[in-house]
């Protein structure tokens, strides 16, 4: 006698496969982002050492976000941390 799996068994297999593939995809995406961030940080550090003034990697205010970092000024920044610490630097 041949054992035919029911529809619920197939559904379970499909759901399990979907969960596993999603987990793998999320891991790959996180690894890819981390590698990109490391590359961006290394490039920023290299440019900083060469005397350039690269834009910050993490934009802190709406003006900087909407101008792609071109309009960032620590003294006029809308982020409260930068407004408080701008005179200390």
Image (tube, rainbow, N blue to C red):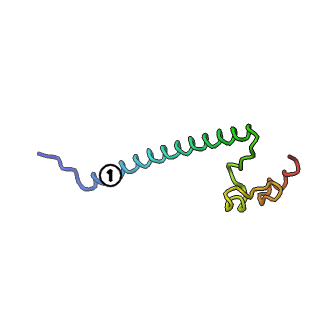
- Residue at the image point whose x is 83% and y is 56% from the top: 75
- Secondary structure at badge 1 equals helix
Res 24 quadrant in image? top left
Q: Position of residue 36 (x, y in %)?
A: 57, 43
For mark 1, what is the residue? Answer: 14
Q: How many marks?
A: 1
6 vs 50, nearest the viewer: 50
Q: What residue is at 23 percent from the left and 54 percent from the top?
A: 6
Q: Position of residue 10 (x, y in %)?
A: 27, 52
Q: Position of residue 11 (x, y in %)?
A: 30, 54
Position of 77 with respect to 6 (left or right) is: right
Residue count near mark 1 (Cα–Cα under 10 Å), binned few <14, some 14–19, many ≥20: few
Q: Specify whether 19 is left or right of 31.
A: left
In the displayed image of the protein, which residue is found farthest to the right?
Answer: 87
Classify the position of the N terminus by image quarter.
Answer: top left
Residue at 75% across / 46% down in the picture?
Answer: 53
Q: Is residue 88 positioned above or below 65 on the image?
A: above
Residue 49 found in image quarter: top right
Q: How far across and how far down the image is residue 71, in percent?
A: 74, 58
| Residue 13 against residue 35 in the figure, above or below | below
Residue positioned 71% across, 62% down in the render: 62
| Front-lying residue, 74 or 22 | 74
Q: Is residue 34 left or right of residue 49?
A: left
Closer to the camera in the image, 24 or 47: 47
Farthest residue to the left: give it: 1
């Amino acid at each position: 006698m041949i054992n035919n799996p029911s529809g619920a068994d197939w559904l379970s297999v499909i759901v399990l496969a979907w969960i596993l593939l999603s987990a793998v995809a999320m891991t790959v995406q996180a690894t890819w982002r981390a590698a990109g961030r490391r590359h961006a940080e290394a490039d920023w550090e290299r440019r900083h050492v060469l005397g350039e003034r690269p834009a910050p990697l993490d934009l802190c205010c709406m003006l900087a976000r909407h101008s792609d970092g071109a309009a960032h000024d620590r003294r006029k920044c809308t982020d409260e941390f930068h407004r408080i610490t701008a005179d200390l630097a």
